[in-house]
Amino acid sequence: MAVELPPDYRPSPDEEYMNPMQLEYFRRKLLAWRDELMQEAQETLDNLRDESYQDVGDEADRASRESEHGLELRTRDRYRKLLRKIEQALERIDDGSYGYCEDTGEPIGIKRLEARPIATLSIDAQERREMKEKVLADR
């Protein structure tokens, strides 16, 4: 069932939480983000491929190019991880669990999802998890 969204639609806390319009809004937001990341990843690949055919130059040029390649590869790895999280968020939209904290089952909240549409934890649960990790790291 396709949901029609007005062009200026923004989720509101006054609406029923995770109603079909909100879910479609976040689905579109996630799909657009995924497409953007895929395009940037392709550009990174193209840059790496193009640069590999250039003359090597002196040691400083080589070192600079290797540093740039390392940065691009780290960025690409970050994109890959982010793409996986976006896919998981899209799956949660499909299975009806999107927008709810995986620890508590409580709503994550529209503001948090606007800022981080791949969020799986409420702010309170995220803070508790970070606190626990800090305590474990300090040992």
Image (cartoon, grey):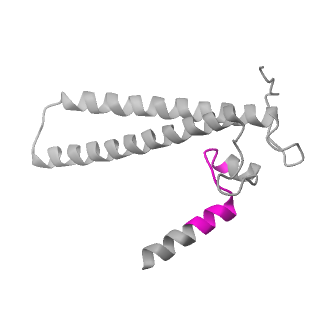
The mark tally for this picture is 0
Q: Extreme bottom residue here?
A: 139
Pick the quarter of the image with the C terminus.
Answer: bottom left
Q: Extreme right residue here?
A: 14
Say whether residue 112 is left or right of residue 56.
right
Residue 7 at x, y percent in the picture: 79, 28
Q: Which residue is pictured at 49% across the width and 42% down the height?
A: 82
Residue 86, above or below 134: above
Residue 28, above or below 135: above
Say whether residue 46 is left or right of residue 133.
left
Bounds of the magenta span?
115-129
Q: Is residue 116 magenta?
A: yes
Pick the front one: 57 or 117: 117
Pick the front one: 133 or 115: 133
Q: Which residue is pictured at 69% across the width and 42% down the height?
A: 98
Quadrant of the image occupied by residue 17: top right
Say whether residue 111 is left or right of residue 90.
right
Pick the quarter of the image with the N terminus.
Answer: top right
Q: Extreme top residue here?
A: 1
Q: Is residue 18 magenta?
A: no
Q: Which residue is pictured at 56% across the width and 72% down the height?
A: 131
Residue 2, above or below 90: above
Residue 37 at x, y percent in the picture: 49, 35
Q: Extreme left residue here?
A: 58
Residue 100 at x, y percent in the picture: 71, 49
Residue 41 at x, y percent in the picture: 41, 33
